[in-house]
Image (cartoon, grey):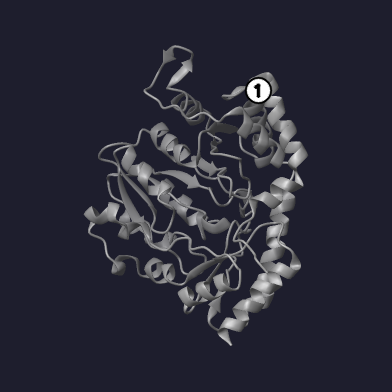
Amino acid sequence: MNIPFADIKRQYNSIKTEVHQAIDEVLNDTAFIRGKYVARFEENFSKMYGVKNVIGVGNGTDAIYLALRALDIGPGDEVITVCNSWISTSEVIGQVGANVKFIDIEPDNYNIDVNLIEKEISKKTKAIIPVHLYGQPVKNFEKLVQIAKKHSLYIIEDCAQAVFSQYKGKNVGTIGDLATISFYPGKNLGAYGDAGVVISNNDELSKKVRMLANHGQEKKHTHIYEGINSRMDGIQGNIINLKLNYIMEWTTRRQEIAKIYDHNLSDIEDITIPKIDQNSTHVYHLYVICAKKRNDLQSYLKNQGIGTALHYPNILPLLDCYKHLNLSVDDFSVGSRLSSEILSLPMFPEMTQNEIEYVCDKIREFYK
């Protein structure tokens, strides 16, 4: 049996006719850049997600960059974020001229350890970027909000992997000052190309983001800022709008698959399955285990036709591009240790019962 880590094509085949209709609508109206189909998506997503403002942009990385620009964060400022995200989260901090400060992770759900944040705050600190990694909200997010208020810091929620996950009944991204979501094709709610959004309940900040994403102009030829060109295209907007009809069904299926994994893997001593915080819901963009002999397990599963992935094999502070920070493994003991143990198992809504059980059987076989 061959089981890919993810299978976007199965989802495409299930809604193929509707996808082609959505693309044809845009082509027939030649509404290629922004336009009415992006506007319709923004309105529908706003209502469904429970947030006032949705700004469609080119991708999730641009979204974080634009959020930082909207908050006037630049040279001399510091921004705090987590050590184990994808580099998009940290690289944009440098792109606006600010300095990044990395925080280690909490060992149970692999998100930023809120208890370590306050001691890293300085007079230069302007914002915190918590990342809701793998599909689960940051643990004790309420305390993070309190810390930000105490020190007059902005919060930019990176929700790239966690769309529609909730903390205490609120969708992630609706709690901070600004939030960003990626619609990269492999995400739970994925486009068929690059796309993203910035969302916020703050009208003033949202207006500024929208201008910055469109060359800094409020209306054509009236440039208030030096902005960038980061506009969602009509085809992506219409495809994501179509997928809004299915996202909750797909999310429920991901949660069902996770329960099957939990049931079949929980008694294996050499594996730690995901732990869910009591205040949160997990949407399982990824199902990530910690495994002894991780590399050997991954090789074994590959030989059995099972695709896996590492999210992420190296923590950010130890990458070559951050050598100038002079940070070490000892500065991030939890993140460093877990980066050698984490393994993402196949996870996509179209997985069959037989496929899930096959993955579990082969893992059990390995540890016998």
Of 287 and 203, the residue lying toward us: 287
Q: Along the horizontal axis of the image, is 11 left or right of 4?
A: right
Amino acid beneath label 1: Lys
Near-viewer residue (183 or 53): 183
- Specify the farthest residue to the bottom: 368
Q: Is residue 136 visible?
A: no
Instruction: Point out the image quarter for the N terminus.
Output: bottom right
SS label for mark 1: helix
Quadrant that contains the C terminus: bottom right
Q: Which residue is mark 1?
A: 36
Query: How far from the left and from the top, in percent, is residue 261?
Result: 66, 71
Q: Is residue 125 visible?
A: yes
Res 52 → quadrant? top right
Which residue is found at the position 67% from the left and 28% from the top? Answer: 40
Q: Residue at x 70, y 73 (%)?
A: 357
256 vs 192, left or right, is right
- Residue 224 locus on image (x, y percent): 40, 18
Is 155 left or right of 103, judged from the image as shown? right
Say how many tags the image has.
Answer: 1
Estimate how packed mark 1 is, as few (under 14), some (14 to 19) or many (20 or more) residues with alpha carbons within 10 Å: some
- Percent from the top left, x then y, of residue 354? 74, 70
x%, y% of residue 46?
Answer: 64, 35
